[in-house]
Image (cartoon, helix red, strand yellow):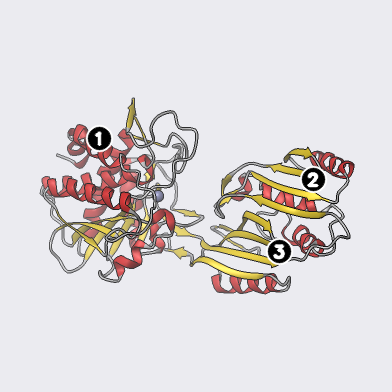
Amino acid sequence: MDYLSFVEGKKTEFLDDLKKILTYPSIMGEKVDGAPFGVEVRKCLDETLKIASRMGFKTFVVNDAVGVVEYGDSEDYVASLAHLDVVPVGDGWDSDPFVGRIDGDKIFARGAIDDKGPAIASLYSLYAIKELGVKIDKKIRLLFGTNEEEGSNDMPLYLAKEKPPVYAFSPDAEFPVIHSEKGMVFVRVSWNLDQKNDGVIVEEIVGGTKANVVPDKATAVLSNVDKEVVSNLIKEFEEQYPYKWNVQYDSKIRVQCQGISTHAAHPETGLNAVMGLIVFLSKLSLNSGVKNTFDWFATYIDSETDAKKFGIFCEDKYGKLTFNVGIVDFKNSTLSLDINYRTPVTLDYDAINEKFVKIIRQTGAKIEFVLKDRPLFYPEDHFLVKTLLEIYRKHVNSTTPPLSIGGGTYSKHIPNTVSFGPLFEGKQDMCHEANEYASISDLITCSAIYAEAMVKLSVNK
Ligand SMILES: [Zn+2]
């Protein structure tokens, strides 16, 4: 029997197990004893390990952060790394996000594709390997993480006690296989600005929710400003740019800029409302306390998603630098911007960051790096990349080369790892969306692909 027939034969059990772990609202929560990333995440992990024990596997938890399912008994091991934590639900769901609702070939729930579906798929891969009695050289571990969505702080806790895998893949991106991921920087830049009475006063600006999302809304409250000036400027902007504007004229004027939200890994596909609003404000006769900073923004940041005017633009054959101002906050004379930029995979990461710091320092801003991740790069002919690609191509008729992405998977946090699936080419990416779903037949195919990958990677060369 092959892997695919085995897992297809267990489809009912597979779906029951998946539904079980989908019921846990495993969004990051408060740290408590035994659960550094919240109780719900921990409960979901325990439930997953219970399923693995039922299948006859040895299981344990490392530092309360990462669950391990183990098969085989060698010193070294190969691994798959899925995560059980999920992002918050958000609006727009047609059914309960924590009930695995099945409709045809789709199962809907928060986490269905990111990453509980793939987690169960990898569990059934190992189950197939064991039940079919397939010979492995190195032992296989399934690692179940609990903090991928909030910084992957689980993996350092794992590596503090366990040695890294010889080879591993993470079923948490897309096929065919991800061989490189951009360098990632989250940085907060802030200025202390003393407003004066000699021009338009910016009372407040708010916009954006996360640095890694292109914001679709930003709002400013203005005083000491002429209504007609604002409405004329809006007309001008409407002719020049695709933004939409909402204005409320009271004693103070409230201007809202509307753009298009998208992921900051590809900011050029959205329309950044924060950047649009700040450029807009810079065209008013602002008071001398803030004018220089807004002028600087309009000249050097503008609404560019590749930081050309800013001066850190660069690109290699795998892609160019991307730049996103995700959040603006201006209250009590502090203007702060949360920026996420991503650096090309083969270029000098430190040099780009040094340049960024130098440019920002010249404006008198304070800089606080919130998160920094070096780029990840495996050549296309690396054993891990080549092996996974070959297995994928046995199942899917495809000539697509290994992919380079904007970055941010587990692969950066644990050595010898690349991301592999679960999303097949041409399929809709529902990660973090309302009505997130996974295709059931695709998850089962993933199981077969992953089983083969685990076995191939485990063979002693
Ligand atoms: Zn994920």
Q: Position of residue 256 (x, y in %)?
A: 72, 42
- Residue at position x 16%, y 61% from top? 137
Which structural element holds mark 1?
helix
User: Which of 408/223 is in front?
Assistant: 223
Please identify the quarter of the rendering in which residue 414 is found: bottom left
Q: Badge 2, how many Cα within 10 Å: few under 14, some, many 20+?
A: some
User: Would residue 265 be seen by someone viewing this image from the given angle?
Assistant: yes
Q: How far, Cα to Cα, is label 3 from label 1?
A: 50 Å
Relative to 437, say whether 298 is above or below: below
Which structural element holds mark 3?
loop
User: Would residue 415 be seen by someone viewing this image from the given angle?
Assistant: no
Q: How far, Cα to Cα, is label 2 from label 1?
A: 56 Å
Residue type at mark 3 is Phe
For ligand 1, tell me if the residue under mark 2 lies within 8 Å. no
Q: Which mark is residue 252?
A: 2
Residue type at mark 1 is Leu
Q: Residue furthest front?
A: 251
Residue holding disc 3: 310
Q: Position of residue 375 (x, y in %)?
A: 48, 65
Residue type at mark 2 is Lys
**Dividing the image into 4 quarters, which one contains the C terminus?**
bottom left
Q: How far, Cα to Cα, is label 3 from label 2?
A: 33 Å
Which structural element holds mark 2?
loop
Q: Is residue 381 left or right of residue 285?
A: left
